[in-house]
Image: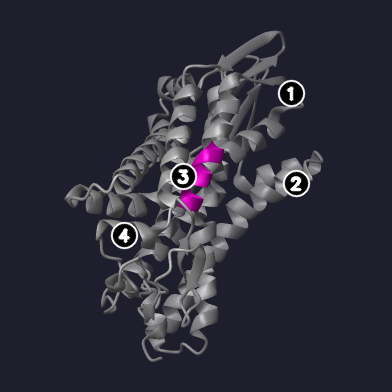
Amino acid sequence: MQDKEKTTHCHECAAKVTLPGTQKPHKAFCPRCGNLLTVVRAKAHQRTAIFSLTAIVFLFLSLPFEFISFSAAGKTQSITIPSGLLVLVENNYLTLAIIESFFILFLPALVLCSIFLLTWRVSQKQQNKVNKRLTHFIFQLQPWCMAEIFLISVLVSLVKIVTLADIAFGPAFFTFCGFVLFSTLTFIYLDEHQLRAATGARLPAHFHSHPTSVQKTWALLITAALLYIPANVWPIMQTNVLGQSELSTILGGVILLWESGSYPIALIILVASVVVPVAKLMILCWLNVRVQTGKVKHPRKMMSWYRLTELIGKWSMVDVFVVAILVSLVQLGGTMTIYPGPAALSFTAVVVLTMFAAHSFDSTLLWKHK
């Protein structure tokens, strides 16, 4: 690291921080707010390039082969990931298909390809404006990659129907697991400060608070709160078994899983679909009120709550992906069929809006008078 790269600003509290100039493996934290500024690892760029390329290979291997097969009442249906999306489209659930493909396929593939290209160029010491643009692009889109959430959703959805049918995993399921594993390793080794220092891209530090941050955050939070009502009142899924139809709300599904003895899965859905959205709305509202009224007494503790909202936000998509998977898989005519309910789109909007609200909240306002 060159001398000019030793000083930076924390993008969470805007404090000016001097980083150690050594290239030996180490971590650097902001002394003011405790934010992890950078992690220096040996051969990080080369390893990130290898991990991202491996993840891309596993992703493409997941597409042509069987993902899951489902057998009930003498009927069998198997799907690949693309054919599962096609089932949604053929049944007029285009929006659900777009949501699933965007968050688990298109966006992760785009981000991983960009990471591979950028880290390879950096390791080869190739410098131009493309590197800066790729750096900004990667760190803007990385929080929206949800392949790991989709994998958890697959397991949850199978628990819901395992008593009704025989389930078998195809080879694509295991290659998708490899994709999730190497994607996770890629993001672990991907260090924002180190890449920005290598490419000359500026850190997105908010050295001056945004005057409209509070208003934007309120608008997003209020809209999300209003949409959360139909997301819980309307059915999120409809199940038809031998001509009998059953509607399930989010909370109704949790109760059904609990009564059937699937306690861990019931708790996962309860936390992801009820506790997390409500907690995120309440925390962001509390932080916004404190900033707006100027009553910020313990900014470091409040920053911890804010980081929590960023960490847990996208995990609420578990229930949406569960519905998409079950609809794709369980299409056995009069024997058994599952359809999505109107709450699926409302709940997706809640998750997306709260993620935007967390992003629009200007955390440097917590430190304005410190």
**Residue flagged by tag 1: what amino acid is it?**
Leu
**Residue flagged by tag 3: what amino acid is it?**
Arg
**How many dots with numbers?**
4
Image quarter hosting the N terminus: bottom left
Would you name the residue on which mark 3 appears?
A: 47
- Element type at mark 1: loop
- Label 1 vs label 3: CA separation? 44 Å
Q: Disc 3, disc 4: CB below 8 Å? A: no
Which label's residue is closer to the chain start, 3 or 2? 3
Foreground pick, 187 / 108 = 187
- Label 4 vs label 1: CA separation? 52 Å
- Label 2 crowd bin: few (<14), some (14–19), many (20+), radius 10 Å: few
Going 45% across and 37% down the picture, which residue do you hit?
104
- Label 3 vs label 2: CA separation? 36 Å
Would you name the residue on which mark 1 appears?
A: 164
Which label's residue is closer to the chain start, 3 or 4? 3
Q: Disc 3, disc 2: CB below 8 Å? A: no
Which label's residue is closer to the chain start, 4 or 1? 1
- Element type at mark 2: helix
Magenta segment, which residues? 180-189
Q: Taking 101 as reference, is 127 above or below it? A: below
- Element type at mark 4: helix
**Residue flagged by tag 4: what amino acid is it?**
Arg
Q: Is residue 189 left or right of residue 267?
A: left
